[in-house]
Image: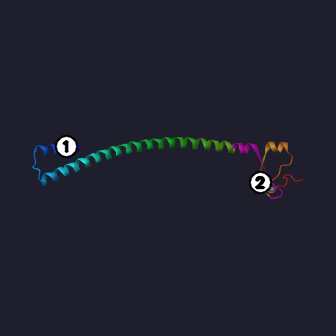
C-alpha cells in the first residue's frame, strides 16, 4: 500500500502539475493517504503481535490445564488413600449417652480405656 502511494506521488511529480488549487488538493490527499498507510502498517504489526501473544497465552493455558488435571488426579488418589487410612485406623462406636456414632482411633483405644464422645463429652463405655 505504501509503495502504491509513493508511486502515486511520483506520478504527480512527473505530471508537473501547475501550482493551482487542484494540485494542492491532490498533494494533500496523497499526504493523507501516506499517513493512513503508515498507521495501517503500524496497526497490522500490532495486531500481529497481539495474535502471537494470544497464541502464547493459549499455549500457557493448555500447559496450566495439563498441570491442573495432573494435580487434580493426584489429589483424587490422595483422597482415596485418606479414606482407606480412615477405615483402617478407626473403630466406630455408638455413644450410649447421645446415640452419636463416634470414630475412635485404635491406638487411642489401646492407650486409654475410656475414650470420650466428642459430641456430648461423656465416656463412650460408661463410668
Ligand atoms: Zn455422646
Q: Which residue is mark 1?
A: 6
Task: Measuring from the top left, give residue 42's x and y in whole percent.
Answer: 31, 45
Q: Quadrant of residue 11?
A: top left
Task: Measuring from the top left, give residue 10's x and y in whole percent.
Answer: 15, 43
Residue neighbourhood size for the residue with mark 1, other residues' Cα within 10 Å, grouped as few (<14), some (14–19), many (≥20): some
Estimate the spatial distance between the alpha carbons at disc 2 and disc 1, rounded to whole Å. Answer: 89 Å
Residue at far bottom of view = 98
Residue stretch rendered in magenta on the structure: 84-98
Which numbered dot is residue 101?
2
Residue drawn where x is 62% and y is 42% of the image:
77
Residue situated in front as seen by the camera: 92 or 82: 82
Residue drawn where x is 13% and y is 54% of the image:
21
In the rendered image, residue 85 lying in the magenta stretch gets the answer yes
- Label 1 residue near ligand 1, CB within 8 Å: no
Q: Give the left or right position of residue 70, taking residue 119 as reference.
A: left
- Label 2 residue near ligand 1, CB within 8 Å: no
Task: Measuring from the top left, give residue 99's x and y in whole percent.
Answer: 79, 58
Amino acid at each position: 500500500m505504501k509503495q502504491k502511494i509513493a508511486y502515486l506521488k511520483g506520478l504527480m511529480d512527473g505530471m508537473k502539475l501547475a501550482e493551482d488549487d487542484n494540485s494542492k488538493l491532490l498533494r494533500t490527499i496523497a499526504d493523507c493517504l501516506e499517513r493512513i498507510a503508515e498507521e495501517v502498517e503500524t496497526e497490522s504489526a500490532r495486531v500481529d503481535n497481539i495474535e502471537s501473544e494470544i497464541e502464547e497465552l493459549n499455549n500457557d493455558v493448555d500447559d496450566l490445564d495439563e498441570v491442573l488435571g495432573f494435580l487434580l488426579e493426584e489429589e483424587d488418589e490422595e483422597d482415596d488413600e485418606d479414606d482407606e487410612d480412615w477405615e483402617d485406623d478407626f473403630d466406630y462406636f455408638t455413644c450410649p449417652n447421645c446415640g452419636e456414632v463416634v470414630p475412635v482411633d485404635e491406638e487411642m483405644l489401646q492407650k486409654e480405656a475410656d475414650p470420650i464422645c466428642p459430641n456430648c463429652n461423656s465416656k463412650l463405655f460408661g463410668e
